[in-house]
Amino acid sequence: MSNPYFNRSDVFGEPRRDGIGTQRAAGNTAAPTMSPAAVETAALENMYAAPAATAAAMKRMTYDDVIVRTGGLLALLFVVAAATWHLAPGIWPAGMVVGLVLGLVNSFKRNPSPALIMLYTVAQGVFLGGISLAFAGLTVEGAPATALVFQAILATFVTFGVALAVYKSGKIRVTPKFQRAVLIGLGSFLVFQLVNLVLVWTGVVGGWGARGGTIGLVVSVIAIGLATASLLVDFESIKQGVQRGAPQRFAWAAAFGLMVTLVWLYLEFLRLFAIIAGRR
């Protein structure tokens, strides 16, 4: 059986009975030939008539690539977090440190490394599994430990879905001005977090410092707003990557970016609900 492509091709297939070529007549020992110009014309016609190459065929990043990789990383995160919750919740500080280091390494790599991104996800799973149990222990007595965590997970995914729907609707445009505003907000919040952390560690302020009580409630709401805005920027970055034909391997980078934002968003919801539960 011959290749179907060659059968359909004017150049490689059987000659057509349309003037370009004719079937060899009975008793005719010389086959009709095509001129070089006719061959080039037929080849060009075939090239233009052929279906356009897909992003997958060209090894370009697609939305499906990002979805599959993000889903896989989330599944890995949940498995590791659940195992840490039940088996070794006390090792969460190690997960936090390793996750921070790997997060910085992945952020500055020019080409994404699937192995390092998965290791980052494992470290974050260890961190989230332990810290979630620690936060759950801060709630009022008698409440199920998993209730707070379930609320934070649900709020995270609901926020993600709403942000995606709003982005796709075009009601909020992620312009360069919007991205600069988000960047300034993130930088300011990072400085605030570092100052508060130093004050708590040095004993200048007690408890959670500015992240507890009524002030902490307000700060958590602001942080959730910043994380949601960061999701919108992530969606725009992924869209630009797909439209510009980024190599397929950068789907890992897109998934990593979403993971970083989702982890932050979850932690802020966890803190917010813990403060609310503790104030009842």
Image: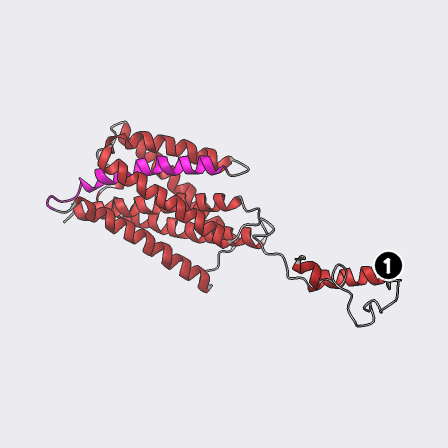
The quarter of the displayed image where residue 202 is located? top left
Residue at (26, 44) in percent of width and height = 271
Quarter containing the N terminus? bottom right
- Work out whether residue 18 or residue 173 is closer to the camera in this orientation and state it: 18
Residue 137 sits inside the magenta stretch: yes
Residue 194 shows in this picture: yes
Most extreme residue toward the top, as rendered? 202
| Rendered view: 4 above or below 114 | below
Measured from the top left, where is residue 264 in percent x and y?
A: 35, 44
Measured from the top left, where is residue 229 in percent x and y?
A: 41, 52
- Look at the image and give the residue range highlighted in magenta: 113-142
Residue at (57, 50) in percent of width and height = 60
Residue at (66, 60) in percent of width and height = 4
Q: 7 left or right of 72?
A: right
Residue 210 shows in this picture: no
Given the image, on which type of amino acid does mark 1 rest?
Pro
The residue tagged 1 is 36
Circle 1 residues within 10 Å: few <14, some 14–19, many ≥20: few
Secondary element at image label 1: helix
The quarter of the displayed image where residue 7 is located? bottom right
- Work out whether residue 86 or residue 162 is closer to the camera in this orientation and state it: 86
Q: 261 left or right of 15?
A: left
Measured from the top left, where is residue 133 in percent x and y?
A: 22, 39
Most extreme residue toward the front, as rendered? 27
Most extreme residue toward the bottom, as rendered? 18
The quarter of the displayed image where residue 91 is located? top left
Residue at (72, 60) in percent of width and height = 47
